[in-house]
């Protein structure tokens, strides 16, 4: 009997057991649990990996988004555009800095922002009393948005681009790596993300010296040159040294894991495309497949069938942000594609430790089902 896992962090842990032990042991030895040497070592490594000029780690992906908007002085009276079909943190961060979110629809092919709907929303926001300031583009399920299109739109409207790359670290668009695709890129090291630690963590990337300096202070209570000189109202938002050590150990398998998920995604796409709506990868785009997400009009039946056959699946996301009770006040638009997706999507296992026979079994079962329903 197969025991298929949606995600297998235990197998991953076993594969880097030695590195993890050595890394954590050395943190205990020097006992610099906050801002220890592993933190800056990781930041230099992530700069190398992403080719971004500056990387600063922080305590979560959510904080990375908040710190970015604080650095851009986005706040009360400002508008930030973001997709409705996303993880709640994207929108939550906008409200946490006091700004107003405007929810934009997404594409059913890529799950990323619909550029036409974005422009429409920018135009109508310009006619309001609020000040449009930034676009948060989410690279949903690991696939970068089209940043060439976004840059054009941002330039024409004098907006900053914040890339919510919580799910896409390691991916590429137009030969540029995630980390260099927006004015500021935010990622998360939540365990289930492509580069996850064993707790909470996040990072910001930018090529701007000014933004880097701002965020460097903001994550330490707004500290200036001197520890007790406070130049901004900041946060306590640091990555633990132990988590940095864990991430350093994980870098040795990061590229391999991304390649494995790409290999699995290709097989899924090929085998399942006649039976379900499979994800589209646009030209010039390389995903890291944080999730592999299919669409069907018969989701309840599909999910039940998968359960009966011991195939784990997840629904990301069952309610788009503009329909969430807490965000009703900001739900001015009808966003048909986000609403349809929330009823039709389901994600199936895609991790580097999924065996050939496990993937084969998932495909066989899904094809049998697809023949029935689609
Ligand atoms: C996970 C996630 C976040 C938040 O990251 P945390 O580290 O959990 O705070 C933000 N945006 C998206 C799209 C995410 O998937």
Image (cartoon, rainbow, N blue to C red):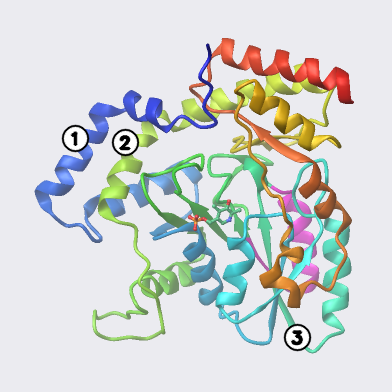
Between the residue at mark 1 and the residue at mark 2, the CA separation in whole angstroms equals 9 Å
Q: Secondary structure at mark 1?
A: helix
Q: Residue at x 38, y 36 (%)?
A: 251
Tell me if 30 is positioned left or right of 76 in this view.
left
Image coordinates of residue 197 in percent, x first then y, are 38, 44
Above or below, 223 relative to 140: below
CB under 8 Å between discs 1 and 2? yes
**Residue under numbered circle 3:** 130
**Residue under numbered circle 2:** 249
CB under 8 Å between discs 3 and 1? no
Image coordinates of residue 14 in percent, x first then y, are 32, 25
Q: Secondary structure at mark 3?
A: loop
Residue 151 is one of the magenta-drawn residues: yes
Q: Residues within 10 Å of mark 2 (few under 14, many from 20)?
A: many
Residue 126 is one of the magenta-drawn residues: no
Q: Residues within 10 Å of mark 3 (few under 14, many from 20)?
A: some
Image coordinates of residue 315 in percent, x first then y, are 67, 42
**Residue under numbered circle 1:** 22
The magenta stretch spans which residues?
Answer: 145-162
Q: Residue at x 20, y 57 (%)?
A: 33
Which comes sooner in the sequence, label 1 or label 2? 1
> Of helix, strand and loop, which mostly describes the magenta segment?
helix
Decide if residue 340 is in sight here: yes
């Amino acid at each position: 009997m197969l025991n298929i896992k949606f995600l297998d962090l235990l197998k991953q842990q076993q594969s880097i057991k030695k590195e993890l032990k050595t890394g954590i042991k050395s943190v205990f030895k020097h006992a610099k649990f906050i801002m220890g040497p592993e933190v800056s070592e990781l930041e230099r490594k992530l700069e190398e990996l992403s080719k971004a000029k500056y990387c600063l780690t922080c305590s979560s992906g959510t904080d990375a988004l908040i710190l970015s908007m604080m650095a851009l002085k986005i706040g009360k009276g400002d508008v930030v555009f973001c997709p409705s079909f996303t993880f709640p943190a994207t929108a939550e961060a906008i409200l946490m800095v006091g700004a107003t979110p405007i929810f934009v629809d997404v594409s059913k092919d890529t799950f990323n922002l619909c550029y036409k709907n974005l422009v429409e929303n920018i135009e109508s926001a310009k006619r309001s009393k609020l000040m449009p300031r930034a676009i948060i583009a989410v690279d949903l399920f690991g696939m970068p948005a089209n940043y060439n299109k976004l840059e054009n739109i941002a330039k024409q409207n004098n907006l900053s681009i914040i890339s919510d790359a919580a799910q896409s670290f390691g991916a590429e668009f137009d030969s540029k790596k995630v980390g260099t695709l927006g004015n500021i890129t935010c990622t998360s090291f939540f365990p289930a993300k492509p580069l996850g630690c064993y707790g909470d963590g996040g990072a910001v990337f930018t090529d701007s010296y000014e933004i880097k300096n701002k965020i460097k202070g903001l994550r330490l209570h707004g500290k200036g040159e001197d520890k007790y000189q406070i130049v901004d109202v900041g946060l306590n938002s640091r990555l633990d040294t132990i988590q940095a050590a864990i991430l350093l150990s994980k870098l040795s398998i990061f590229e391999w894991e991304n390649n494995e998920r790409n290999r699995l995604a290709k097989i899924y796409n090929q085998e399942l495309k006649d039976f379900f709506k499979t994800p589209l990868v646009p030209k010039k785009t390389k995903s890291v497949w944080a999730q592999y997400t299919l669409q069907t009009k018969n989701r309840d039946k599909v999910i039940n069938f998968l359960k009966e056959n011991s195939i784990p699946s997840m629904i990301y996301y069952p309610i788009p942000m503009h329909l969430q009770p807490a965000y009703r006040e900001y739900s001015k638009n009808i966003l048909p594609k986000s609403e349809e997706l929330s009823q039709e999507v389901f994600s199936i296992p895609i991790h580097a430790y999924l065996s050939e026979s496990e993937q084969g079994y998932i495909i066989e079962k899904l094809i049998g089902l697809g023949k029935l329903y689609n």
